[in-house]
Every structure is written in structure tokens, then in C-alpha cells.
Amino acid sequence: MSAISFTVPFDPERPDLTSDTDIQNEIFIQVFNSGDGELFNRLYLEDSVSNFSGEPLTGADRLKFFKEFLSAKPTLKAKVTHSYVAGDVALIGVEYSIDTTGPDGEPVRLEGVCTDVLRRIEDGRWLMAIDRPVAATGLVAD
């Protein structure tokens, strides 16, 4: 069980990004900022793709990256710019910034826009299917 205190209803054992865009964003930010890569990975479907590392990752590779990157306790700020829902699929646009520490110990700011696709699964929960951030500054893959 996670020791994170959420400001919105959230079950770390059965995460649900919900159909409410504001709650989705708040959950995503709080879990990211927790530094818990394993918990963050639970927001994703097993076969979902994230290119946050600079290359598309899924499954065990995605989990490994999240654990390593989030262990530095980066801080995410995100603002939803648009949201469209069609049945069991949602398309979300986000402007984001991440403050973290580079390998040299110096502060790094990553900024950009992100396109997310969420999918509602059989039990009604919404999880991340595609996470495609595009950094304007401070590319993670550099």
C-alpha cells in the first residue's frame, strides 16, 4: 500500500484515471510526484506505449525507466489544454514542465506538450494507453 496522500479519491491497488479530465490530471501529477515508479506504471495498460524516455517503451522496459527516472523525485506540473472522449477512448492534450536533477547534479527543466490516449477497460476504470510527451527543452533522451 502506498503512503501517498491523495487530494482526490484514488485506490493505488486498482488505479483509475476516471472519466473526469481534471481528476485524471491531478492523479497523474500526484502519482508522478510521489517518485514511486511502480505505482506510476500502474496507471498504464500492460501493452500501453510511453515515449517519455525518448523512445517508445512498453511493459517491463517502461516500468524500469519509470522506476529509474522517478527515483530522483522530479516535480511535474501539467495543464490540460483539451480533452475529447469517444466511447471507451479519450484523447487528452497537456502542457507540462518537469523539474529534476541531471546526471551532473545540476537542475534540469523539461517542458513541452503531451498527447495522451486513455482507454476504459472492462471493469470501467480508465488507464493510459499512449503517453507521448514532446519536449521543447531538456530532452530526457539527451
Image: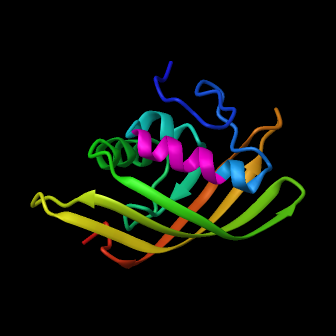
Compared across the picture, whether 12 is left or right of 37 comes to right
Q: Can you name the residue that lies furthest to the left here?
A: 104
Question: Residue at the location (60% across, 44% down)?
Answer: 27
Residue 25: x %, y % from top left: 63, 54
Point out the stretch of residues depicted in magenta.
Answer: 25-34
Residue 45: x %, y % from top left: 62, 44
Q: Can you name the residue that lies furthest to the bottom here?
A: 136
How many marks are shown on the rendered structure? Answer: 0
Question: Residue at the location (70% across, 48% down)?
Answer: 23
* Secondary structure mostly seen in the magenta stretch: helix
Q: Quadrant of residue 57?
A: bottom left
Q: Quadrant of residue 95?
A: bottom right
Residue 93: x %, y % from top left: 65, 70
Question: Residue at the location (40% across, 66% down)?
Answer: 55
Q: Quadrant of residue 16?
A: top right
Q: Nearer the viewer, residue 59 or 6?
A: 6
Residue 59 on the magenta segment: no
Question: Residue at the location (71% across, 54% down)?
Answer: 22
Residue 107: x %, y % from top left: 20, 63
Compared across the picture, whether 111 is left or right of 15 comes to left
